[in-house]
Image (tube, grey):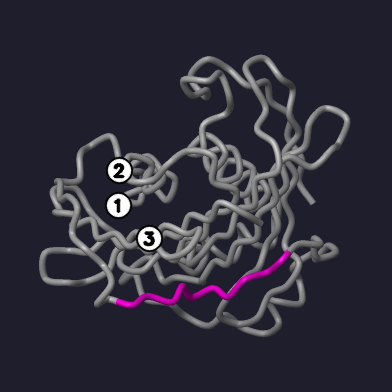
């Protein structure tokens, strides 16, 4: 388990003074990478084999948003792993360890030389430290999509400020893109990451509203899918 503490600052809040959704993702992402860096055996294997982990999917359940100047605690840990994927929980608490936001995420092992998903040795898996799985409603990694029900609502070019040090769109930036196409006060976000979008790519935004959910599909102009996002207004 890895834990970090933070104070909600002005750069992290929305128009209502509450922690922005993309800032939730930033906090979780930072904590997760600090945890990976703290695992010496993991870091050693990654460096020696030119391997990393890329996010495949994330489910975030929002119970309460902290406001400006609130103290928060972020905890993350791996609860399961196989030769292809690692599974982690990340939880944001208030300063009294009341749960504010709960997440489970799946990451795939990737060969950095070609970007392909790989399988790691079982002996390596035995060296990973596991913690107890968080209690939450675990929905499937894959999001069901009815392409016939989707309607194109926008398209735009990927800008420099979306790009991270992997030279593609950072996972949290898809949230920044998405919030323009949904109403506020959603309670759950699911994201399935497909093909990484790079600088200059055109993202075609397709949308469908199904019951209390909004589905967004970010495609390329030739119909490759970058990401699928589902916003739910109840848990």
Query: Residue 168 — which label?
Result: 1
The residues bearing labels 3 and 2 have C-alpha atoms spaced at a distance of 29 Å
For the residue carrying disc 3, how many other residues have a C-alpha within 10 Å: few (<14), some (14-19), or many (20+)? some
Marks 1 and 2 in Cβ contact (< 8 Å): yes
Q: Is residue 217 above or below residue 179?
A: below
Which residue is pictured at 31% across the width and 63% down the height? 217
Task: Kindly state the secondary structure of the residue where label 2 is placed.
Answer: loop
Above or below residue 3? Residue 39 is below
Tell me, yes or no, whether the two marked residues, 3 and 1, touch with CB atoms within 8 Å.
no
Magenta span dominant secondary structure:
loop
Marked residue nearer the N-terminal end (1 or 2): 2
Q: Earlier in the sequence, mark 3 or mark 1?
A: 1
The residue singled out by tag 3 in the image is: 209
Distance between mark 3 and mark 1 Cα atoms: 28 Å
Q: Is 167 positioned to the left or the right of 13 in the image?
A: left
Q: Residues within 10 Å of mark 1 (few under 14, many from 20)?
A: some
Which residue is found at the position 59% from the left and 38% from the top?
27
Q: Residue at x 51, y 63 (%)?
A: 53
Viewer-nearest residue: 80 or 37:
80
Identity of the residue furthest to the front in this view:
211
Q: Which residues are magenta?
A: 137-146
Determine which of the numbered discs, if any, sits on residue 163 in the image. 2
x, y percentage for residue 181?
32, 45
Residue in the foreground of this view, choosing between 164 and 94: 94
Between disc 3 and disc 2, the foreground one is: 3
């Amino acid at each position: 388990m890895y834990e970090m503490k933070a104070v909600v600052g002005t750069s992290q809040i929305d128009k209502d003074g509450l922690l922005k959704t993309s800032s939730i993702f930033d906090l979780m992402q930072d904590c997760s990478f600090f945890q990976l860096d703290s695992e010496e055996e993991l870091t050693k294997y990654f460096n020696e084999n030119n391997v990393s982990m890329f996010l495949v999917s994330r489910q975030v359940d929002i119970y309460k948003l902290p406001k400006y100047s609130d103290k928060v605690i972020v905890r993350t840990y791996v609860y399961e792993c196989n030769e292809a994927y690692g599974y982690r929980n990340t939880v944001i608490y208030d300063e009294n360890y009341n749960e504010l936001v709960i997440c489970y995420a799946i990451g795939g092992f990737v060969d950095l030389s070609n970007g392909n998903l790989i399988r790691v040795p079982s002996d390596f898996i035995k060296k990973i430290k596991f913690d107890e799985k968080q209690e939450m409603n675990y929905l499937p990694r894959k999001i069901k999509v009815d392409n016939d029900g989707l309607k194109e609502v926008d398209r735009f070019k990927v800008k420099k400020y979306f790009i991270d040090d992997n030279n593609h769109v950072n996972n949290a930036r898809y949230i920044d893109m998405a919030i323009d196409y949904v109403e506020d006060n959603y309670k759950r976000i699911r994201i399935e990451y497909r093909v990484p979008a790079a600088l200059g790519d055109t993202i075609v935004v397709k949308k469908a509203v199904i019951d209390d959910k909004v589905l967004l599909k970010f495609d390329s102009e030739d119909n490759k899918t970058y990401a699928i996002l589902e916003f739910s207004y109840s848990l």
